[in-house]
Amino acid sequence: MSVILESLAGDELYCLEEFVTSPHGQPFSWKSGRKIRVGERVRFVSWYEDQHVSNNPVCWMVIFEAADGKRYAGTQTYFVTAECWHGLRKYFGRQRRKTAEAKKTKAGSQRSVTRKKQVVVSG
């Protein structure tokens, strides 16, 4: 699952991990930095190898355009394609529903057990 291999310029990507980045080509600064949030939709522009971390898998950087129209860069592992994002949402949505249903069932069975343990004393 590599957005670099699976994406063309203009394709929609989704962010998987929150991070802060400055506009592409500018040195990092908290003042000019922008927080990219999980689930944020961006547009793929291009990619490059960051020579500062070339011995590391995070060296492959994605250049993307955010909603503010500016271009930023982030490591490729922070992004997935739209198809992958929708698949993840569907999968985890099902898991969440299953968990909620299991909790309801468990809570319901605990209530019935509690009722069975109660002893009624008449006077």
Image (spheres, grey):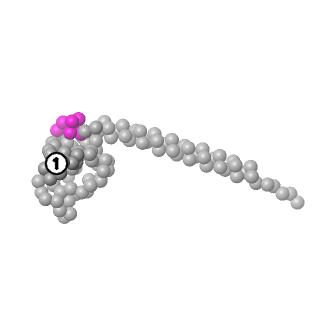
Image coords of residue 102 (percent x, y) = 56, 44
Q: Quadrant of residue 35?
A: bottom left
Question: Mark 1 Cα within 10 Å, few/some/many (few <14, many 20+)?
Answer: few
* Residue furthest front in the image: 55
Image coords of residue 72 (percent x, y) = 18, 51
Question: Circle 1 — which element?
Answer: loop
What residue is shown at x 16% (from left), y 43% (from top)? 47
Identify which residue, 123 or 24, lies in the foreground. Answer: 24
Quadrant location of the C terminus?
bottom right
* Residue furthest left in the image: 25
On screen, residue 72 above or below 86: below
What residue is shown at x 17% (from left), y 62% (from top)? 29
Image coords of residue 82 (percent x, y) = 29, 39
Quadrant location of the N terminus?
top left
Identify which residue, 5 or 70, lies in the foreground. Answer: 5
The residue indicated by pointer 1 is 54
Residue 7 in magenta? yes
In this orientation, does residue 66 appear?
Answer: no
In this orientation, does residue 48 appear?
Answer: yes
What residue is shown at x 19% (from left), y 42% (from top)? 44
Q: Which residues are magenta?
A: 3-9
Image coords of residue 37 (percent x, y) = 29, 53
